[in-house]
Amino acid sequence: MEKGVQRWLVDISKWNPSSNDFSFALSLLPQTHHPSITRFVKMEDRKRALVSLLLQYALVHEVLGIPYSDTVINRTLEGKPFLECGRFSFDIPNFNFNVSHHGDYVAIASEPLCLVGLDIVNFTIPEKETVQEYIQNFSSCFSSLEWDRIITAGSNEDVLTEFYRYWCLKEAYVKAIGSGLGYGLQKVEFHHINWTNISVKVDGVTNPRWRFWLFDLGKGHSVSIARGYPRSAVESYKRSLKRTEFDEEEYNVGLNLPNPRFVFKTVEELISVVHKALCSC
């Protein structure tokens, strides 16, 4: 089952495609995805959207071996991507994945049994705002305990880092369950010991069926991973899962699988994987 636990990361600042190179990479993806990429005006945004989809198709092909022509990736109404896998049988009991992009990085994480949520943050603020002004816009998204830890973290840089770390974890949880932006982030409270041994309380109740990790990517970026119980998913996302009920022994196997480090991929590697998969159809 460990094969289903994947962590891939791309630094898009290292990819500067010509117009032809970008068009070729785009042509490898199903036409249904093209508008979600070309709707962006800025090339950096187009790159993030394109690489996010390349990661999804490359990972599904590499991990599950599903023929490219049979691979269908859709999104729920709330926007979470999922693989339509009803026609296929494979050893992984509940394969699911999540993607994120911010700043220089685009990433994907997958799990074989538990829900997975992923979020990347880039520690930036709008040019015309101070750190205090910026974070105040989001104060209602944090519990009183979290907010106190943020505003007393130290220097402006420390405050911004603390803010984004909590935000990153909250987003990973919400994305794992498949909820949209309307989910009350203030209901999700995180506890940690120097950003390790991270645990969560939802509506004031500690939930031991979840695991969280937070990593520094460098260049002012962090990434978080959430791993949790499939029954916690919102209804629209539950319908995309193969299973949502597991006995304690089986679930604990999935919950306690090793959490590997991210593997860096280049865009060229992803293009090669998807191109070969497409040509083999």
Image (cartoon, grey):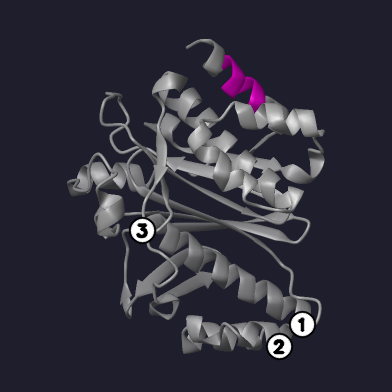
Provide the residue designation for mark 2.
132
> Is any part of residue 46 visible from this angle?
yes
> What segment is highlighted magenta in the picture?
270-276
Q: Is residue 110 left or right of residue 220?
A: left
Is mark 1 in CB contact (under 8 Å) with mark 3? no
Q: What SS does tag 1 mark?
A: helix
The residues bearing labels 2 and 3 have C-alpha atoms spaced at a distance of 30 Å
| Quarter occupied by residue 35 | top right
Task: Please tell me whether the stretch drawn in magenta is mainly helix, strand or loop.
Answer: helix
Q: Which mark is residue 177?
A: 3
Find out whether residue 272 is within the magenta segment: yes
**For the residues marked 1 and 3, what is the alpha-carbon distance in whole angstroms?**
32 Å
Kindly identify the amino acid type of the residue bearing the numbered disc 1: Asn
154 with respect to 109 (left or right): right
Answer whether labels 1 and 2 touch (C-beta < 8 Å): yes
Position of residue 205 relative to residue 95, above or below, is below
Q: How far apart are marks 1 and 2 (CA)?
A: 8 Å
Residue under the point 77% across and 77% down: 157
Nearer the viewer's eye, disc 1 or disc 2? Answer: 2
Q: For mark 1, what is the residue?
A: 156
